[in-house]
Image: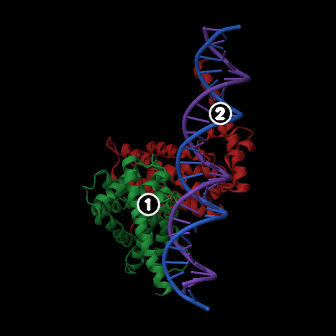
Chain colours: A green, B red, C purple, D blue
DNA sequence: TTCGTATGTGAAACTCAGTGTCACGTTAGT
DNA sequence: ACTAACGTGACACTGAGTTTCACATACGAA
């Protein structure tokens, strides 16, 4: 077996363990509340040591929010893949389709996760922080679409930020409706709210 | 002296101590870096006990960000004070004048603070969290302006969020320019970037 | 096989933020 | 003087996150 192939299978195994740990942690958090559960509890419940748990997720929060890390890059990639002649708003709106698709794949799970996050200040804060990191990535993608090698302009950054807000607000309303409302329609409505006058 | 008057003079004294502690902390943070300074360091430098320091600021972050707490309410109040026939965007833009006024009052201090915040992940995250709290307040103010007693609509929430982004992005660029650019113009430019097409 | 190395894991000590409790001193009203 | 309220300091405690070390297992090379 080649070194590359070995590394690959190791990564697969790691990802599986990671998913398992996240699952155990999530159930414990939902049952007991995020703050009540200590790292020792998590480690014990998952059958690993505290050290190991912290090696998989740098923080307690990341046991819940780890899955979100990919969303930002996915959205930025999707944005770059939009036709070059599309205006920024349409391109941003379409790029976010890739993100809300994750929610539509498994609405029950997404709903439970979102609820846990919203009712836990620490998770809420950490998620804000992560999403804040997406903004420059999206702005950069907008700049590249415009054929610029310069850093993103103020206007591009504002648009990227506003688009992320649309996503968030739409998700808030979707969560508040227990998933009854249509996420696509909510997101469209959010973008429409940005139209001036 | 009445009980109310006594309470009032006590509050004045407390505010003065608070300002003094914040000043000492700020200088220490700038000199050594936020992470390097422990609560014990802060207490020692300020000549109070760790307990006392933590009574004035619930967290280390709040020693830097305490002043920001008022901004959100100020902006919401300013928003409510705008003429009822003004459209949401104009009213939001004008309400933010009250916030940037704080920056124009003492640009050097504002610049130093903002820089410290931007280069310290923990402060950055905490500020995001605080600003996130302004959003519902602004959205609520928009709803009241519209004569509604209902909770804010999705559209109003999106607009409030976008306006806050404009403020943030404008401040980012202002900070990056070392205060050379005009904050009012940057904010206007940010709002202009929200115009569709 | 055996040796060496890389990697995953566990154990433990450590730092530090934040909470809670209690005792002490000061202030001001009775 | 008595006391009630409040600000402060000292201390113990919890829990997150870091670091270090030792051990085990797996794999490639000799």
Residue at the image position 54 percent from the left and 55 percent from the top:
B125
Outermost left residue? A180
State which quarter of the image contains the C terminus of chain A.
Answer: bottom left
Disc sitting over residue A143 in the figure:
none
Instruction: Report which quarter residue B6 is drawn in.
Output: top right
Question: Please, which chain is the residue tagged with disc 2 on?
Answer: B
Residue C29 against residue A40 in the figure, above or below: above
User: Is residue A168 at all visible to an observer of this figure?
Assistant: yes
* Image coordinates for residue B117, horizontal then vertical, percent: 61, 56
Mark 2 secondary-structure assignment: helix
User: Is residue B195 at all visible to an observer of this figure?
Assistant: no
* Image coordinates for residue B74, horizontal then vertical, percent: 52, 43
Q: Is residue B146 left or right of residue B48?
A: left
- Cα separation, mark 1 vs mark 2, equals 40 Å
* Residue ID for mark 1: A65
Residue A1 against residue B44 in the figure, above or below: below
D30 vs A195, nearest the viewer: D30
Tags 1 and 2 in contact by the CB under 8 Å rule? no
Mark 1 secondary-structure assignment: helix
Residue at the image position 39 percent from the left and 57 percent from the top:
A24
* Residue ID for mark 2: B14
Question: Please, which chain is the residue tagged with disc 1 on?
Answer: A
Residue at the image position 37 percent from the left and 50 percent from the top:
A30
Q: Is residue B22 left or right of residue B189?
A: right
- Within 10 Å of disc 1 (Cα), the crowding (few <14, some 14-19, many 20+) is many
* Image coordinates for residue C1, horizontal then vertical, percent: 54, 84
Q: Is residue B19 left or right of residue A139?
A: right
Residues marked 1 and 2, same chain: no
B84 vs B138, nearest the viewer: B138
């Amino acid at each position: 077996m080649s070194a590359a192939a070995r590394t690959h299978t190791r990564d697969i195994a790691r990802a599986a363990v990671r998913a398992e740990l996240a699952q155990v942690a999530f159930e414990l958090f939902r049952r007991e509340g995020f703050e009540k559960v200590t790292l020792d509890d998590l480690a014990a419940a998952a059958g690993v040591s505290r050290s190991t748990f912290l090696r998989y997720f740098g923080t307690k929060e990341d046991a819940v929010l780890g899955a979100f890390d990919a969303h930002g890059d996915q959205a930025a990639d999707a944005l770059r893949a939009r036709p070059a002649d599309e205006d920024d708003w349409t391109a941003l709106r379409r790029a976010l389709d890739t993100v809300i698709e994750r929610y539509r794949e498994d609405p029950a799970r997404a709903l439970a996760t979102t609820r846990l996050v919203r009712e836990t200040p620490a998770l809420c804060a950490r998620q804000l922080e992560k999403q804040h990191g997406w903004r420059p990535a999206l702005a950069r993608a907008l700049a590249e679409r415009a054929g610029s090698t310069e850093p993103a302009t103020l206007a591009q950054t504002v648009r990227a930020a506003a688009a992320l807000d649309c996503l968030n607000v739409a998700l808030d309303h979707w969560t508040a409706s227990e998933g009854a409302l249509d996420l696509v329609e909510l997101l469209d409505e959010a973008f429409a709210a940005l139209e001036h006058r």
